């Protein structure tokens, strides 16, 4: 698979993930475009938080379901589903971070990747 194909696939994944998180009321969503950072481990980080462990689990499950339905893919790796404080879903070139508010405020991933092109996503009404 060529670099252009991988880039397009990342863009499609990002759109589906953002729409899924919006539909399930993820809070303060941001997209970090890491493609111009040589040391980055992927193309994009998508970050949001939920209001409870149930909300975090719901966002996670619905992102998985929507990606599976639209692209017939599953995350390569998932972490944090047991404690539901910070769930990470790794789709190779797109990594989704779904936090509880306290963990998000503590780790401040957006600040760690300050060189990224950061896009703040409007919340659906």
Image (tube, rainbow, N blue to C red):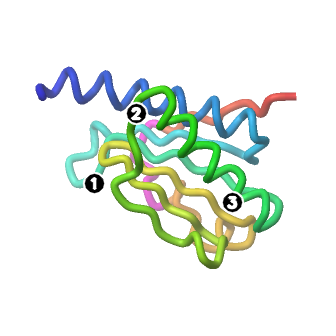
Q: Is residue 40 above or below residue 69?
A: below
The residue to which callout 1 is attached is 41
Is 123 drawn above or below residue 41 in the view shown? above
Q: On the picture, is 53 further left or further right than 98?
A: right
The residues tagged by marks 2 and 1 sit, at their Cα atoms, a distance apart of 23 Å
Q: What is the span of residues highlighted in magenta in the rendered image?
A: 112-117
Q: Is residue 102 magenta?
A: no
Residue shown at 78% from the left, 57% from the top? 55
Q: CA distance from mark 2 to mark 3?
A: 21 Å
Residue 83 or residue 104, whichever sits in front: 83
Q: Residues within 10 Å of mark 1 (few under 14, many from 20)?
A: some
Residue closest to the far bottom: 83
Q: Residues within 10 Å of mark 2 (few under 14, many from 20)?
A: few
**Disc 3 to disc 1, C-alpha distance:** 25 Å
Picture quadrant where residue 106 is located: bottom right
The numbered mark at residue 54 is none
Tell me which numbered mark, 3 or 1, is placed earlier along the sequence.
1
Q: Position of residue 105 (x, y in %)?
A: 68, 67
Prevalent SS, magenta region: loop
Q: Secondary structure at mark 3?
A: helix
Number of callouts? 3
Rendered location of residue 99, percent (x, y)? 65, 63
Q: Earlier in the sequence, mark 2 or mark 3?
A: 3
In percent of the image, x 21 and y 22: which residue is there?
5
Q: Residues within 10 Å of mark 3 (few under 14, many from 20)?
A: some
Tags 2 and 3 in contact by the CB under 8 Å rule? no
Residue, disc 3:
57
Image position, residue 107 (x, y; %): 57, 71
Q: Closer to the observer: label 2 or label 1? A: 2
Left or right of 4? Residue 51 is right
Please name the residue that numbered disc 2 is placed on: 72
Looking at the image, tell me whether mark 2 or mark 1 is earlier in sequence order: 1
């Amino acid at each position: 698979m060529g670099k252009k194909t991988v880039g397009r696939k990342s863009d499609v994944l990002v759109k589906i993930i953002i729409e899924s998180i919006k539909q399930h009321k993820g809070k303060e969503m941001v997209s970090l475009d890491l493609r111009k950072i040589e040391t980055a481990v992927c193309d994009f980080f998508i970050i949001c938080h939920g209001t409870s462990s149930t909300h975090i689990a719901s966002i996670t499950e619905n992102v998985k379901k929507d990606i599976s339905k639209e692209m017939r893919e599953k995350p390569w790796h998932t972490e944090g589903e047991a404690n539901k404080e910070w769930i990470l879903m790794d789709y190779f070139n797109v990594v989704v971070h779904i936090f509880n508010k306290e963990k998000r405020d503590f780790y401040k991933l957006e600040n760690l990747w300050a060189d990224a092109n950061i896009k703040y996503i409007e919340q659906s009404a």
